[in-house]
Image (cartoon, helix red, strand yellow):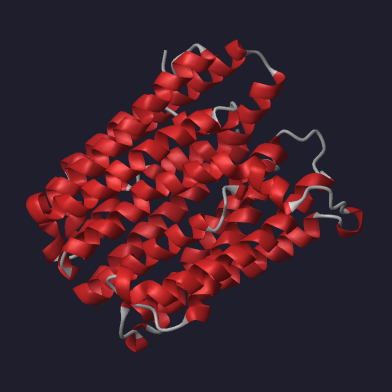
Amino acid sequence: MKKNIMSALLRSCGALLSFFLGVFITRSFDHDISAQFFYFYNLITLSAVIGLFGLNTLIIKLTSSCKTKDNNNVVTLVFKSTILIFMSSLVIALFIFTFQNYILKYAFESYFIIFLFIFIINILAIIGSFFQGCFKISTSIVLVNVFPFIFFFVAVYLFKEDVTSGESLIYIFGFSFLISACIAIFMFLLKIDLPSLKLKNSLHGILGQSKFFYITQISQLGLFSAMPLVAAVNLQSGDIAVFYATIRVAAIISFVLVVFNLITTPRISYIFISESKYTLHQYIKKTTYLIASITFPILCLIFLFSDIIMGMYGPDYESASTILRVIIVGYMIVSFTGQIGALMTMANLERELALINFLIVPFSLISAYLIPGRFGLLGIACLFSFVMVIQNILGLMYIRKKLGFYTFI
């Protein structure tokens, strides 16, 4: 229990750092620089997930189900995953740099920078997943969610006068993640036993195991990263900055969901393998009630004081309070449905989860391209909430069909 509380505190610290960092950026720089930074941030995040192949989820699932802490196969998987993400980062960075003038609203100046950022973020994701699967949740949170933002905030504060574009901010952001990645690699090497490694699984076999995790992650990023990128094509810089700021405020509540996923995902995998379905149902129901009891009051406060919260970003952002309220309503519904994605992933329903997301993403991206011209930011916010809710409702129906229970009853 003490470890869980510490994990929640650390993750909330990371979420607050991310929020106040966004406030600091919008107040310190103009709309163009803020919009470029948020745009590049989402692009790099999406690119990193594309190159990750779902390996982080596979590592969590395999590590948490191992009976021994130092399982050679899992450690080998981490090393081979590193090889895969290195190659994928090279290819994705080359594609972005070659076609950026045709597909992006803003362009990068360096191919190497794109590659380095994608690779660093994925290294952190892989090592963080390893520690999460070993039930060292606090270590994973500090490495992935706390250290990078602390380093970034300090660097931006020190070199604020030298920032001339959103790309300059992204360079500082990448350097902050590089420091965190070096620390993560050092801690990982201290934990494992290199001479005992046995290279059994081929790269093809690893990709075969992670393919449904990969489809799911790509599809989910279609909502949280790709959809705003597509919408940005038909938006002005000011609207882009406002929309990204709104999403970041609404995402404050996601730290609760992420904390529960970090803590419970390995446990769900263990219970599914070792215990009865009744025990799994009771555990899921308990976590759903706990999530709802924590998130609903926070969501209500954000809903009621959205004008004040958005005003923290600057006077130009106060008008986005209605947009924020629409997104908050979506998060309210999602919080009451519980941990749909985590349960389906760890209960061998990743194929069904991948199918749900795969079907929703085309609709989301096409709508995100068409809606801004007619309905503006409010239309995008409604689409964002609608897709988020539909994903969870469809997942809930599959859980009822395959496992025989609802997450909240």
Where residue 190 appears, as percent x and y from the top left, is 79, 60
71 in relation to 37, above or below: above
Where residue 188 appears, as percent x and y from the top left, is 73, 58
Residue positioned 16% across, 67% down in the render: 238
Q: Nearer the viewer, residue 38 or 258?
A: 38
Task: Judge left or right: residue 92 versus residue 157.
Answer: right
282 in relation to 25, above or below: above
Quadrant where the C terminus sits is: top left
Where residue 380 appears, as percent x and y from the top left, is 19, 48
Tell me how many marks there are. 0
Q: Nearer the viewer, residue 52 or 11?
A: 52
Residue positioned 62% across, 40% down in the render: 3
Within the image, what quadrant is residue 79 found in? bottom right
Task: Judge left or right: residue 202 versus residue 353.
Answer: right
337 in relation to 153, above or below: above
* Res 264 seen here: yes
